[in-house]
Amino acid sequence: MNLLSRAEELTLLAIWRLKKNAYLVTVREYLIETTLKDWSVGAVFDSLDRLRKKGYVETYLGNPTSIRGGRSKRFYEISKRGRDALNDIKKVNDEMWSGYTETVK
């Protein structure tokens, strides 16, 4: 079973949501928008780097642009192993939350 940290889980889900537009800046913006928490660039980069090292995401470089001084964006996409990890964590979460009906006051 592939268990992820919460930051890794949310980062992987952000990549899944963003599809072909998943790079550091857009992933961070999506996480901030969705969680209503400030995510530092370093925190997002660390999660992306851990996911890459675990084989859960693959990266590729986009075309260089003059706006970025001739540099390319590094894009992220979920690998088969990453999809398996998301499926595993979803099963665990579903089981853990199963039967929970209490409402927060």
Image (spheres, grey):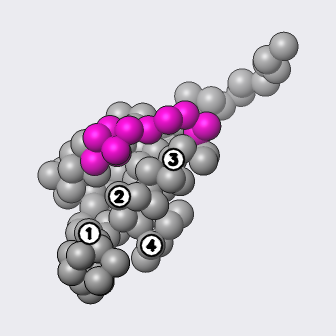
- Which numbered disc, 1 or 4, marks the residue that appears first in the sequence? 4
For the N terminus, the quadrant is top left
The answer to whether marks 1 and 2 mark residues whose Cβ atoms lie closer than 8 Å is: yes
Is residue 21 visible from the viewing direction of this image?
Answer: yes
Residue 22 found in image quarter = bottom left
The answer to whether marks 1 and 4 mark residues whose Cβ atoms lie closer than 8 Å is: no
Q: Rate crowding at label 3 as few (under 14), some (14 to 19) or many (20 or more) other CA atoms within 10 Å.
A: many
Q: Amino acid at mark 4?
A: Asn
Q: Which residue is mark 3?
A: 31
Residue at point 28%, 48% (across, down): 45
Alpha carbon separation for disc pair 1 and 2: 8 Å
Q: Which residue is mark 4?
A: 21
Q: Which residues are magenta?
A: 35-45
Q: Which residue is mark 1?
A: 74
For the C terminus, the quadrant is top right
Q: Is 65 or 34 nearer to us in this picture?
A: 65
Alpha carbon separation for disc pair 2 and 3: 11 Å
In this rendering, position of residue 8 left or right of residue 59: right
Label 1 element class: strand
Q: Is residue 99 above or below residue 67?
A: above
Q: Amino acid at mark 1?
A: Arg
Q: Amino acid at mark 3?
A: Leu
Q: Amino acid at mark 2?
A: Leu
Q: Which mark is residue 24?
A: 2
